[in-house]
Image: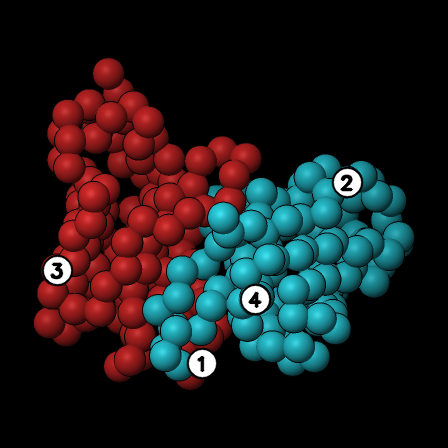
Chain colours: A cyan, B red
């Protein structure tokens, strides 16, 4: 069965701390994504990755970085957490099908981050 | 920049058909349209995907007109368990791997 696992469901951090959100998928998918979800704003794309060591900025990359050293793992890093990064973070992966974007996105259960 | 527009919310009653429309005026020629459902405290999950005309599966139908600038998700005979947020998803026209969600439509089904 398909599985995307996010390391922490709930985190509480202080302003200025470095935060790592980990995401692991067991489906050998090439594409991986990080979204944040806030009330009234839907899901907004932070970063995505085509494959190992490849990354692309989404719509709201400021204040975030990512790492993809292995195909199954895509990490989101907040170098210096701020209160406006309090949010639900969702990781997803997708298998590339025939070079088009027809592959289904599989999501993790989300990581709710609170920055005090 | 890809942009999708959906109604913010919709109400329905059990047993009715619900149609949710999404506009995506600058969809890329080779892009597919995908719809997802999300329950509270869960990640979105795939419902249906299409390129043009009509697609039907066991839970929904998707209607896409010839110009592909919009799509309509149709849920037949909704039940209380269909109360959720529904998102349409397309790729950015300059990079279709950059998958952009809209703000979603919150569907509330009443008894």
**Is mark 1 in CB contact (under 8 Å) with mark 2?**
no
**Which of labels 2 and 4 is toward the front?**
4
Which residue in the protein does label 4 denote?
A: A28
Circle 1 packing at 10 Å, graded few (<14), some (14-19), many (20+), is: few
B103 left or right, relative to A64: left
Q: Report the residue at 67% width, 56% height from top.
A: A23
Circle 4 packing at 10 Å, graded few (<14), some (14-19), many (20+), is: few
Which residue in the protein does label 2 denote?
A: A11
Location of residue A45 by image quarter: bottom right
For the residues beneath circles 3 and 4, the answer to whether they share a chain is no
Determine the CA span between mark 1 and mark 2. Answer: 33 Å
Along the viewing direction, whichever of B83 and A71 lies nearer the viewer: A71
Along the viewing direction, whichever of B94 and B59 lies nearer the viewer: B59
Image position of B61 with respect to A12: above or below: below
Q: Report the residue at 39% width, 66% height from top.
A: A103
Q: Chain of mark 4?
A: A
Q: Position of residue A16 (x, y in %)?
A: 88, 54
Q: Circle 3 sits in a helix, a strand or a loop, which is it?
A: strand
For the residues beneath circles 2 and 4, the answer to whether they share a chain is yes
Determine the CA span between mark 3 and mark 1. Answer: 25 Å
For the residues beneath circles 2 and 3, the answer to whether they share a chain is no
**Which of labels 3 and 4 is toward the front?**
4
Q: Circle 4 sits in a helix, a strand or a loop, which is it?
A: loop
Which residue in the protein does label 3 denote?
A: B54
Which residue in the protein does label 1 denote?
A: B95
Q: Report the residue at 25% width, 30% height from top.
A: B11
Determine the CA span between mark 2 and mark 4. Answer: 27 Å
Q: Circle 2 sits in a helix, a strand or a loop, which is it?
A: strand
């Amino acid at each position: 069965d398909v599985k995307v696992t996010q390391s922490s469901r709930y985190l509480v951090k202080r302003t200025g701390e470095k935060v790592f959100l980990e995401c692991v998928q067991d489906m050998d998918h090439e594409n991986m994504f990080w979204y944040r979800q806030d009330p009234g704003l839907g899901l907004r794309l932070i970063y995505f990755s085509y494959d190992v060591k490849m990354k692309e900025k989404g719509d709201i990359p400021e204040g975030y970085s990512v790492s993809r050293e292995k195909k199954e793992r895509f990490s989101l890093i907040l170098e210096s957490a701020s209160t406006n990064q309090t949010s639900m973070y969702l990781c997803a992966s997708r298998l590339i099908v025939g070079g088009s974007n027809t592959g289904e996105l599989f999501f993790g259960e989300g990581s709710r981050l609170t920055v005090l | 920049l890809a942009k999708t527009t959906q109604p913010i919310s919709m109400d329905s009653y059990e047993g009715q058909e619900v149609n949710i429309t999404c506009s995506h005026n600058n969809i890329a020629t080779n892009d597919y349209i995908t719809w997802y459902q999300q329950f509270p405290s869960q990640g979105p999950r795939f419902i249906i995907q299409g390129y043009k005309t009509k697609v039907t599966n066991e839970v929904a139908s998707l209607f896409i007109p010839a110009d592909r600038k919009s799509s309509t998700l149709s849920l037949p005979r909704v039940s209380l368990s269909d109360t959720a947020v529904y998102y349409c998803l397309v790729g950015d026209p300059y990079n279709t791997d950059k998958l952009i969600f809209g703000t979603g439509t919150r569907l509330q089904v009443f008894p």
